[in-house]
Image: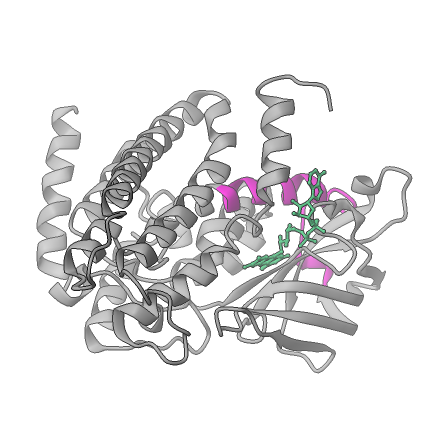
Amino acid sequence: MTEKLDIFAKEVDAWIEHNCPQSMRTPMPVSEQVWASSSIKFPSKDSKAWFDAMVSKGWCTPEWPKEYGGGGLSFEESKILRARLKFFGCRPAQINFGISMLGPVILEFGTKDQKKEFLPKISRGEIWWCQGFSEPGAGSDLANISTSAKLNDNEYIVNGSKIWTSEADKADWMYCLVRTSKTEKKQAGISFILINMNQANVKTNPIKLLSGQSPFCQVFFDDAIASESHRIASENDGWKVAKRLLEFERTMMADLGNEGAVDIEPIKTYKNSDAPRTPGKHKLHRKIIKHEIRNHLIELTMTRTSIESKSSFSPAALTLKYLSTEETQVRWELNVASLGVGGLEAVETSEGLKQEIAKSFFYSKAYTIAGGSSEVQLNIISKHILGLPS
Ligand SMILES: Cc1cc2nc3c(=O)[nH]c(=O)nc-3n(C[C@H](O)[C@H](O)[C@H](O)COP(=O)(O)OP(=O)(O)OC[C@H]3O[C@@H](n4cnc5c(N)ncnc54)[C@H](O)[C@@H]3O)c2cc1C
């Protein structure tokens, strides 16, 4: 590390010490997540203080330019900031798809007006975004979308339906893929638009999951309106924006631990559980050790790819979503096993740590589907890294 970065790291440590309340340096249960929103809610005074401190520094979006609410940090400085926040166990100040997914594509493809209109609000956590990509007839084959948008003067009239839209019933805005032209090559007739969810012609239907939660919805558009000025990139050129956004989504999913997902270490669960141990316990010990080693290797690879991607394409980045989400499932299976017999009680009847583990165990089944299924990720790896024929 250069002397300048060394000084920066020390300043960050001092800042965290001064600004991050002790209660914000503990693992975060789902019930205490702070979601960016026009009606943002804080579970405690400490979480509001932590949010305010991070927002005023622009450190929720450390690499974004200061004029758009960012911290104006260099790549190296942001890396140090993230590493120090992780070292101190600081909770994410806010959960915001705008920061992890939409903001970076607006920075890359948006007009100056779009940047000015949306980026500062995203950085300050003022908008709850949802992602309208999947449809009943388009998931892995995303280019198959049929939700249509027809331009009438300066407005798009949107009709159709989106499905598996996370948190759509709470969202203020949706970034959405729509069909603006019927072309032979399906990708060539798609546009990327931003839709205000607060209008009568948009309806959301929550879908209940195995985990007892309802994190996503089906959304219906019946002549919904979107402004032409809220289209990112040219008409019919939205596919390139979508592909870039999916790269950001997969990076986020590979790095779930840092993005506000609950994390409980199986080793701690094992040590703190007073369940009687069966003769099979040595097998469980070995599984936990292997998992911790693989987890550490994934973290190291993540750091390596973020450095490599700075200068050129990093093939290892394509493997991370697959490896990391599969390993996260193993992590929750080991947490359940570590609780011993009866470890997986029904979500409704368990409480405290057991309930947190049960919920996360069930929810983790979704990680290898959301953002592109494991099978599809393996297809990408075989084609783009190994060069195997399709
Ligand atoms: C928790 C969660 C949150 C989500 N949130 C959102 C959201 O906010 N917005 C949004 O737009 N979408 C969201 N999704 C949807 C997600 O992107 C899709 O579920 C995913 O892309 C898979 O599409 P599908 O469900 O239509 O499955 P399908 O594409 O129908 O796939 C079904 C099965 O076939 C396999 N398969 C498909 N094609 C191939 C192939 N070529 N080779 C091998 N196997 C194949 C798949 O791996 C899968 O096992 C979410 C999903 C989950 C689980």
Q: Residue at x 90, y 48 (%)?
A: 182
Residue 73, x across and y down, in percent:
30, 40
Residue 303 seen anywhere in this rendered image of the structure: yes
Pick out the residue farthest to the front.
279
Residue 234, x across and y down, in percent:
73, 45
Viewer-proximal residue, 21 or 162?
Answer: 162
Whether the magenta-drawn stretch holds residue 390 is answered as no
Q: Judge left or right: residue 161 versus residue 357.
A: right
Q: Judge left or right: residue 69 versus residue 225.
A: left
Residue 104, x across and y down, in percent:
50, 45
Pick out the residue farthest to the top.
387
Residue 74 seen anywhere in this rendered image of the structure: no
Q: Residue at x 36, y 29 (%)?
A: 301
Residue 165 location, quadrant:
bottom right
Q: Residue at x 59, y 18 (%)?
A: 386
Residue 390 location, quadrant:
top right
Image quadrant containing the N terminus: top left
Using the image, determine if residue 317 lies above or below residue 26.
above
Residue 59, x across and y down, in percent:
29, 52
Whether the magenta-drawn stretch holds residue 244 is answered as yes
Q: Which residues are magenta?
A: 227-250
Q: Judge left or right: residue 113 versus residue 65.
A: right
Viewer-proximal residue, 167 or 49?
Answer: 167
